[in-house]
């Protein structure tokens, strides 16, 4: 294996592993704001218990996420030094903004979130929860801005030539609001909401199956289902917007998504297998002219195919086709799970101990936690591999971005060590997560004692 392939595998592995955690922390942050807001609004101690329990899950996820993200910073210098020199002015400014404005905000208020329950008032603590949630989202903003600039560069000019060429920012806000940044941000953040929502759904359904912490599980499941339904439906909107912008800004990527080799009024494939030698989709089922209608609103308008792109500038077609379609399929599956859960809740069947619900629906909800994680990973693979062979679209090829002195044996050794360390971190994460789930929520107040932050009108009703 050559050094380029090994470096790509190493970076893909470390990023993919790290990307398990940030979407989960962003989604859990949103769920925490909802739960603690309900506690402030109603004074119901059960919402307080919910907020404290899911805060522990958030803290664990945040810690592992920070630990796994550090490695990537070093890989930019060790494996991708040419890339770092070329985009340092652009990429570095976005990463610096993420560290200064977002990470410090999130980590600063995290102390109040974790340790301030009995030390500050409820509104102050709720404010810290909101700031942690906002900081997590703000981190996503700057990371997506940096990555989107690689997809659709804007607000820059090139200084120097040859090996000494580099991109410099000429318009900071044009760089921030590059043609793909905002639609990619929306799609990514909503996917993170799904990740947190289905995690809440999964643990709550597990408690219901085991007949543990029943009222806690019912309330948590309701919050999770509401967030999951909103996020899943929003993914249809953000995904449609994102795909339309890909058709405008990166037409070869959209053509790879759909295995479209010829510019024509294009069909939308539900599934299939791309034979790259024969340049066609085999064993597929397609809706005629549906892709043209989705992209432009005109079923007869041609969509640019790969025949407009030189063979050496095309991404790996079948890989991108499969990852993209798998992501879309999972997305529709998550819509189905959330709609089914809300429908059964509305009909009074979800918590009624109905046999077929316990046998089929609740186990489905338990495993649904995997859906957003797989969809996030597949979406990332589709976006990044679909950009190939460019590391900065149209400007710098991946093969030209590699460090000139890095050796294959060094990359292979570090890849093996990273794999072992990350495996241990993942095992630790699963072990601690399992321990916290089995321990369950802490019941800090008995049922007959009103919570000290109970609103006066509820307190008066309790006393009477």
Image (spheres, rainbow, N blue to C red):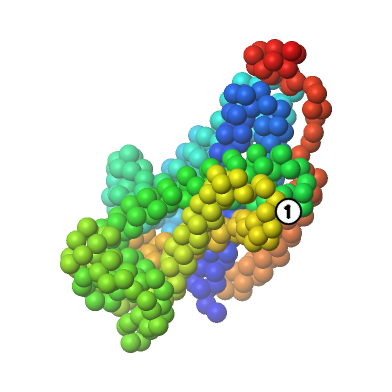
Count of numbered circles in the view:
1
Work out whether residue 384 or residue 437 is closer to the camera in this orientation and state it.
437
Q: Is residue 365 left or right of residue 339?
A: right
Label 1 sits on residue:
209
Work out whether residue 333 or residue 296 is closer to the camera in this orientation and state it.
333
Residue 226 seen by the camera? yes
Q: Which residue is found at the position 41% from the left and 80% from the top?
A: 273
Residue 164 position in % (x across, y down): 36, 58
| Above/below status of 437 relative to 291 | above
Residue 3 position in % (x across, y down): 53, 73
Q: What SS does tag 1 mark?
A: helix
The quadrant of the picture occupied by the N terminus is bottom right
Q: Which residue is found at the position 21% from the left and 70% from the top?
A: 265
Q: Is residue 461 left or right of residue 325?
A: right
Residue 412 position in % (x across, y down): 62, 72
Query: How many other residues sit within 10 Å of disc 1, few (<14), some (14-19) or many (≥20)?
Result: some
Q: Is residue 290 left or right of residue 257?
A: left
| Above/below status of 109 relative to 10 | above
Residue 316 seen by the camera? no
Residue 54, quarter of picture: top right
Q: Which residue is found at the position 36% from the left and 43% from the top?
A: 176
Residue at the extreme bottom of the image, as rendered: 278
Work out whether residue 19 or residue 361 is closer to the camera in this orientation and state it.
361
The quadrant of the picture occupied by the C terminus is top right
Residue 115 position in % (x across, y down): 73, 29
Q: Which residue is found at the position 32% from the left and 47% from the top?
A: 178
């Amino acid at each position: 294996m050559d050094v380029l392939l090994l470096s790509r595998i190493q970076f893909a592995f470390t990023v993919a592993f790290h990307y398990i955690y940030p979407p989960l922390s962003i989604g859990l942050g949103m769920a925490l704001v909802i739960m603690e807001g309900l506690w402030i609004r109603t004074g119901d101690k059960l919402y307080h218990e919910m907020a404290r329990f899911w805060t522990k899950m958030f803290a664990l996820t945040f810690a592992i996420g920070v630990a796994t993200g550090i490695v990537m910073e070093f890989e930019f210098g060790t494996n991708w030094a040419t890339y770092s020199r070329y985009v340092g002015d652009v990429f570095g400014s976005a990463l610096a903004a993420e560290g200064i404005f977002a990470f410090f905000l999130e980590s600063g208020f995290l102390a109040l979130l974790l340790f301030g329950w009995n030390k500050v008032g409820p509104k102050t603590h709720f404010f810290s929860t909101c700031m942690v949630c906002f900081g997590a989202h703000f981190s996503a903003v700057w990371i997506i801005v940096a990555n989107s600039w690689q997809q659709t560069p804007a607000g820059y000019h090139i200084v120097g030539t040859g090996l000494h060429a580099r991109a410099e920012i000429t318009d900071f806000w044009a760089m921030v609001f590059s043609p793909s940044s905002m639609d990619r941000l929306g799609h990514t953040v909503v996917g993170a909401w799904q990740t947190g929502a289905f995690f809440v759904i999964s643990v709550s359904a597990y408690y219901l199956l085991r007949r543990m912490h029943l009222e806690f599980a019912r309330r948590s499941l309701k919050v999770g289902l509401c967030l999951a339904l909103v996020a899943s439906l929003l993914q249809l909107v953000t995904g449609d917007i994102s795909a339309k912008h890909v058709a405008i800004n990166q037409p070869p990527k959209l053509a790879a998504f759909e295995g479209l080799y010829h510019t024509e009024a294009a069909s939308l494939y539900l599934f299939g297998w791309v034979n790259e030698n024969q340049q066609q989709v085999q064993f597929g089922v397609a809706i005629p002219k549906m892709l043209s209608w989705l992209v432009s609103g005109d079923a007869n308008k041609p969509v640019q195919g790969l025949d407009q792109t030189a063979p050496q500038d095309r991404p790996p077609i079948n890989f991108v086709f499969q990852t993209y379609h798998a992501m879309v399929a999972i997305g529709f599956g998550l819509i189905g799970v959330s709609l089914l859960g809300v429908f059964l809740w509305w009909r009074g069947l979800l918590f009624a101990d109905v046999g077929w619900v316990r046998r089929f629906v609740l186990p489905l909800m338990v495993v649904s936690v995997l859906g957003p994680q797989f969809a996030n990973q597949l979406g990332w693979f589709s976006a990044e591999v679909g950009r190939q062979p460019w590391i900065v679209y149209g400007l710098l090829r991946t093969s030209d971005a590699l460090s000139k002195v890095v050796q294959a044996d060094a990359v292979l050794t570090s890849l093996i060590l990273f794999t072992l360390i990350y495996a241990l971190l993942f095992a630790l994460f699963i072990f601690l997560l399992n321990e916290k789930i089995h321990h369950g929520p802490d019941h800090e107040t008995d049922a007959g004692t009103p919570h000290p932050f109970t609103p006066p009108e509820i307190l008066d009703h309790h006393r009477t």
